[in-house]
Image (cartoon, rainbow, N blue to C red):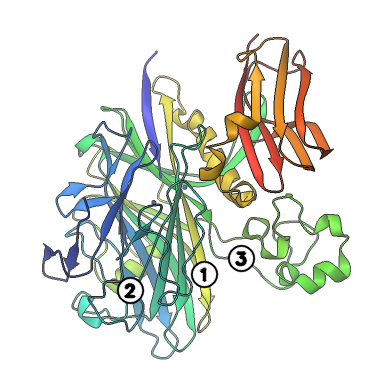
Amino acid sequence: MEYKKFLLITLCTLFLHTDARSMQFHSDCGFDKKMHNINQVEMWVSNYGQFANGTPSDPGLFWPKGTGWSYVFGAGLWFGTIDSLTNDTLVTIGYICTGSASEYTPGLSGMHHPNANARIYIYPNLWPPPQTIFPMAPQIPVSNQDSWCCFSDSNPNQHMPGDTRPIGIEVYQTVYCWILPWIDDIIFLIYDIKNVSHHNLKDCYIGIEVDPDVIGEWNDYATAILRRTYSINGESFIVDNLAYAWDDDTGGSVGFDFLQTPFDLVPGQDKDNDGILDQYERDSVYYVSNLPQYKWDVDNDGVPDWRDASENPQLGLTSFHQFRRWHEPIGDTSRYKRMAGYDSNGVYNPYDTIIRYPDDVRFLMASGPFKLPEDSIVRIVLGIVLGEFEMNNPPHETLFVINDRWAQLYYDMNWFLDIKEHKIQKIKNQFLNVMPNPAANFVKISYQVTEPTNVSLKLYSILGQMIKIIYNGHRTKGDYQIDINLKDLSAGTYFLVLETPTSRSIEKLIIMQ
């Protein structure tokens, strides 16, 4: 049986200065790069809109850690709009494959450059970002290796010559990655984009351009999964958007999943069929006045639904275009049309998913259109996941989409109740133990409660579906044991999750026939 590796991405320090003419490295110019490497994915991030890019001539995403096997040559954030005052078509790019240029500058809009504070802050060694300078920056880490930085497109000298100029946006970039066993091949990349142009932005699109470099070869393929249902081990789930590339010679593949996109709320409609009209989806007064309390947080993730992006209709992936070397769109008008779903011939063809002959393929994925009022913020979240697929068993994505399911679930559940996993890792074996493991018919679960508190103990499948509530109630301080009959459960991998209001412990359980 031949297996292929798949790297899904639904994001020493190098300093890069870019302009339209050249790419040079400077140690004092403020363009900063740092590598996330706490789990199995090693990925460079920057403070100027690029990620998964090492140097202008080297790739920047590797898996598994330590192998040096590359999967992406470079990628970056695009933002496009139609100027509401002049009707100019504007696109700010964080990365283009030809030349690796970026039109973003480190720091906030108007900040003097270079500025020693406009850098990448990464937990735990360089954390937190100074809140007096960056009041929007996080102070408490969420994952095992958070990073944060900001950049803007306000410097006209950073933009490429021709038909482009600044839009007036600031970008706040956050990266999360964990070492937990089922998501240690996942990185989460979050962009919060603020309109600082002093007027409203209309017909906006957010895009990601990717230049795959699967094991250093120029014979990649590309396509996208668009709302496809999978049934694995008797469980069904939907993959709604996943753009990826792979190389069937060397056994690698790279992709991005939009875990969150701008909202798609149309007054008078109910796009997610939840019984709540779109205009009330984010209205807390409506929930409190018209819905019973048990409907205020339907997924029980600790976030009220009016503040929970995963419970609101979203635009999702609205365009996907692939192109070959030297054929990427040039100029703001051409780039904007591609983000809006038009092909190189000007024909509206939003999803270019045809699998063609292998080449030095690149792709652009986008979400829009949407409005961005003055001083408002829009968020987009990308999932970065690793998986395997069996070459001789098409469709080849059926095995790695399990990991994509975990990426979406982990995000949708508020990073699993916003528990700080880097702290839990140190104490999880003290709190929860499973014997025997693997198990066949019965298993004994032992856990410890250090103070009187509410406790829940739940069993989840490998796809994230809750199978059984083993216990949910109050416990006094002490040691507890529970014997569980496994005869009604199928063979496979499961997860036991022990939660209190202040802690979370997780153990993998393998059930054999």
Q: Are marks 3 and 1 in contact (CB under 8 Å)?
A: no
Image quadrant assignment for residue 127 = bottom left
Quarter of the picture holding the C terminus = top right
Give the SS element for disc 1. strand
Type of the residue with mark 1: Val
Q: Residue 27 in the image: state x and y as whole percent.
A: 15, 64
Give the residue pinned by disc 3: 264
Closer to the chain start, of discs 2 and 1, is 2
**Residue 66 vs residue 169: left or right?**
left
Mark 3 and mark 1: span between their CA atoms?
12 Å
- Image point (41%, 76%), residue name: 81
Image: 501 above or below 348: above
**Residue 134 vs residue 231: left or right?**
left
- Observer-side mark, 2 or 3, equals 2
Q: Which mark is residue 107?
A: 2
Give the residue pinned by disc 1: 378
Give the SS element for disc 2. loop
Image quadrant assignment for residue 503 = top right
Can the viewer see residue 39 in this picture? yes
Type of the residue with mark 3: Asp
- Observer-side mark, 2 or 1, equals 2
**Residue 419 vs residue 80: left or right?**
right
How dense is the environment of label 3, judged by Cα within 10 Å: few (below 14), some, or many (20 and up)?
A: some
How dense is the environment of label 1, judged by Cα within 10 Å: few (below 14), some, or many (20 and up)?
A: some
Q: Residue 265 in the image: state x and y as whole percent.
A: 65, 68
Q: Residue 199 in the image: state x and y as whole percent.
A: 47, 88
- Image point (18%, 55%), residue name: 326
Can the viewer see residue 226 in this picture? no
Quick one: 448 or 358, which is closer to the camera? Answer: 448
Mark 2 and mark 1: span between their CA atoms?
18 Å
